[in-house]
Image (cartoon, helix red, strand yellow):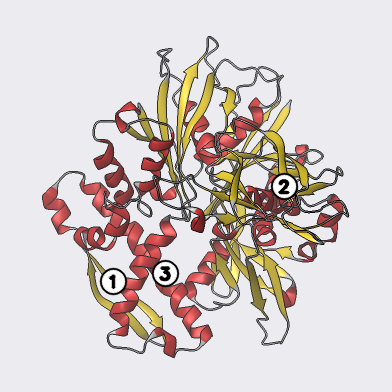
């Protein structure tokens, strides 16, 4: 009957969930699975095939042989420090814009290959597509027609288009973008089939912290007579690149400082050795962070046990030299990470996006009926403790699986988009109101910012009159910026992010005082389209055509 795909393209891990129904009365929940993704594991100098629900979002490039390794093999290669210039992590936090990777030859040749972030991310999608084709051969004709892919709610136009282009390059013909907190919420409300609805409106705050991004979304849920929900997104946090990577780097810097007390400074090593040192120290920091957190969580509220929890640190960094002599405990972690856990940190801490979302929704923390935690870093004790202290008695619960909940919610959303699908055991989002994490501004000819698209999306289309201020104009600049509204008297314009725009050729009639009508619209994926008065359509960030995809050099590369 149907095949529905949800993909979480994550900073640390990517996952895919599917629903395959054969009969009209098949339950989508009973047929919802998170797929094991086939990938290689590093064994000595070779690889061994494995399957894991999580595909680590790591890449290892062998440009001489036109090969890219994804997942565990690439992550283990990065951690080993063997090829620091050919490995990469955290692609997601660099999506959009002009960020690129320049990969040198492994064989010492002079040739290099440059990849932008959509091209890098496409290799994760291709790995997923190859797995799905192998596991579902009966769906081969239509498997790559469409999927739902999730992004942080705060992703702007550039980043959303870059994500869509990565999916197209990865093998899908079309994709629908869904915000990650919404996907996690949909997964969560369907993981409790026996929970009775009171019929009352309730506010749920979704706190989604992964490897590199932190999203907070406040949703007002209003159940209808059919058991579905009208979901009104009443508050979003602004863009925040904070996640597990930040904690790893902070702990890694602590390790490095201790190492440099008795050894050479990092900048005294060659570029390749610096890359090797950084990859090894960050990978070990991630390991010790996770292991100590597990031990702390196991202690619960038993203070005596907590006082006894310690971990000795020892690992080789480079050339037989070790990071050693360090003993970690909860106090060291609490002190080290205080910059993120401080209740007074207003911009860069774990609580900052919660306060922003509450302010934007005109709610107090006491108005929140439930806090839902998702994302790999939500399992870190520091995150849970910080949020618990802030909310007090408000219930705090985790999604059913912090690793796969987002892709499961995306698959359920894909299923719900088919109007023919009806199931009494699925709580659907019958209507979804969206918001932007930031306003969209135009920088006019006088270098002033004018509001174009409000973050509450009270308008999804309109006309802006761009006024010419000079007597003679050959080209005029048209650039959009994303940014948050001023907080009090504080000028926020210096923190605005420029979206892709361009210089537009002027017509003879564009004289001083002339106003050029510019039509704008924003679609359900929050992708902006601009139309100039001569009906020329200007997509600020261009979606790839099928011809672009077919001609891309990434097709020359084999996966794993």
**Image side of residue 72 versus residue 382, left or right:** right
Is residue 286 something that shows in the picture? no
- Who comes first in sequence, dot 1 or dot 3? 3
Residue 501 pos. (x, y %): 70, 55
Residue 69 pos. (x, y %): 64, 65
- Who comes first in sequence, dot 2 or dot 3? 3
- The residue shown at (39%, 63%) is 248
The secondary element bearing badge 3 is classed as helix
The answer to whether the residues at label 1 and label 3 have Cβ atoms under 8 Å apart is no
Location of mark 1 (residue): 313
Q: CA distance from mark 2 to mark 3?
A: 48 Å
The quarter of the rendered structure image containing the N terminus is top right
Task: Reply above or below: 510 against 258.
Answer: above
Nearer the observer, 501 or 61: 501
Location of mark 2 (residue): 466
Q: Residue furthest top?
A: 225
Q: CA distance from mark 1 to mark 2?
A: 60 Å
Q: Across the whole image, how many numbered discs are drawn on residues?
A: 3
Q: Quadrant of residue 99?
A: bottom right
Location of mark 3 (residue): 282
Q: Quadrant of residue 391?
A: top left
Residue 278 pos. (x, y %): 45, 75
Task: Reply above or below: 139 against 279.
Answer: above
Is residue 112 something that shows in the picture? yes
**Image side of residue 372 versus residue 501, left or right:** left
Mark 1 crowd level (few <14, some 14–19, many ≥20, 10 Å Cα): some
- The residue shown at (60%, 72%) is 46
The secondary element bearing badge 1 is classed as strand
Nearer the observer, 33 or 364: 364
Residue 110 pos. (x, y %): 71, 87
């Amino acid at each position: 009957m149907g095949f529905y795909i949800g993909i979480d393209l994550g900073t640390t891990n990517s996952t895919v969930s599917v629903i395959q129904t054969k009969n009209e009365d098949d339950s989508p929940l009973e047929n919802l699975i998170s797929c094991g993704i086939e990938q290689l594991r590093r064994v000595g100098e070779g690889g061994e095939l494995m399957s894991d629900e999580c595909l680590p979002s790591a890449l290892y490039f062998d440009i001489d042989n036109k090969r890219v390794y994804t997942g565990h093999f690439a992550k283990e290669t990065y951690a080993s420090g063997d090829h620091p210039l050919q490995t990469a992590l955290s692609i997601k936090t660099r999506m959009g814009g002009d960020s690129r990777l320049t990969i040198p030859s492994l064989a010492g040749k002079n040739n290099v290959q440059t990849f932008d972030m959509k091209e890098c991310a496409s290799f994760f999608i291709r790995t997923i597509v190859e797995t799905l084709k192998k596991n579902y051969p009966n769906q081969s004709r239509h498997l790559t027609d469409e999927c739902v892919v999730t992004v942080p709610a705060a992703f702007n136009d550039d980043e959303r288009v870059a994500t869509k282009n990565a999916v197209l390059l990865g093998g899908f013909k079309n994709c629908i973008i869904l915000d990650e907190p919404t996907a996690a919420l949909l997964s969560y409300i369907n993981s409790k089939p026996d929970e009775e609805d009171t019929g009352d409106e309730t506010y749920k705050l979704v706190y989604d912290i992964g490897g590199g991004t932190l999203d907070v979304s406040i949703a007002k849920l209003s159940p209808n007579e059919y058991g579905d929900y009208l979901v009104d997104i009443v508050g979003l946090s602004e863009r925040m690149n904070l996640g597990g990577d930040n904690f790893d780097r902070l702990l890694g810097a602590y390790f490095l400082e201790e190492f440099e007390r008795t050894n050479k400074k990092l900048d005294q090593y060659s570029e390749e050795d610096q890359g090797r040192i950084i990859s090894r120290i960050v990978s070990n920091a991630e390991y010790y962070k996770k292991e100590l957190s597990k031990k702390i969580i196991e202690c619960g509220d038993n203070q005596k046990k907590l006082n006894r929890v310690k971990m000795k640190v020892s690992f080789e960094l480079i050339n037989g030299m070790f990071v050693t002599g360090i003993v970690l405990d909860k106090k060291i972690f609490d002190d080290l990470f205080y910059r993120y856990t401080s209740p007074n940190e207003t911009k860069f801490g774990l609580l900052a996006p919660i306060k922003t979302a509450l302010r934007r929704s005109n709610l107090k923390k006491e108005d929140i009926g439930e806090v839902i935690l998702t994302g790999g870093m939500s399992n870190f004790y520091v995150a849970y403790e910080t949020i618990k202290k802030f909310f007090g008695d408000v219930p705090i619960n985790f999604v059913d699986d912090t690793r796969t909940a987002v892709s499961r919610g995306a698959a359920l959303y894909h299923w719900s988009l088919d109007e023919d699908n009806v199931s009494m055991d699925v709580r659907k989002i019958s209507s979804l109101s969206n918001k932007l994490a930031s306003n969209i501004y135009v920088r006019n000819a006088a270098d002033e910012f004018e509001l174009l698209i409000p973050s509450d999306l009270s308008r999804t289309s309109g006309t802006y009159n761009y006024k010419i201020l000079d007597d003679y104009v050959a080209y005029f600049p048209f650039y959009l910026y994303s940014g948050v509204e001023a907080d009090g008297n504080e000028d926020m314009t210096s923190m605005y992010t420029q979206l892709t725009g361009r210089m537009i050729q002027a017509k003879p009639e564009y004289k001083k005082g002339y106003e050029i009508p510019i039509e704008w619209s924003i679609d359900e994926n929050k992708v902006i389209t601009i139309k100039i008065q001569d009906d020329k359509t200007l997509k600020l960030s261009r979606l790839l055509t099928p011809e672009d995809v077919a001609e891309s050099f990434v097709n020359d590369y084999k996966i794993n």
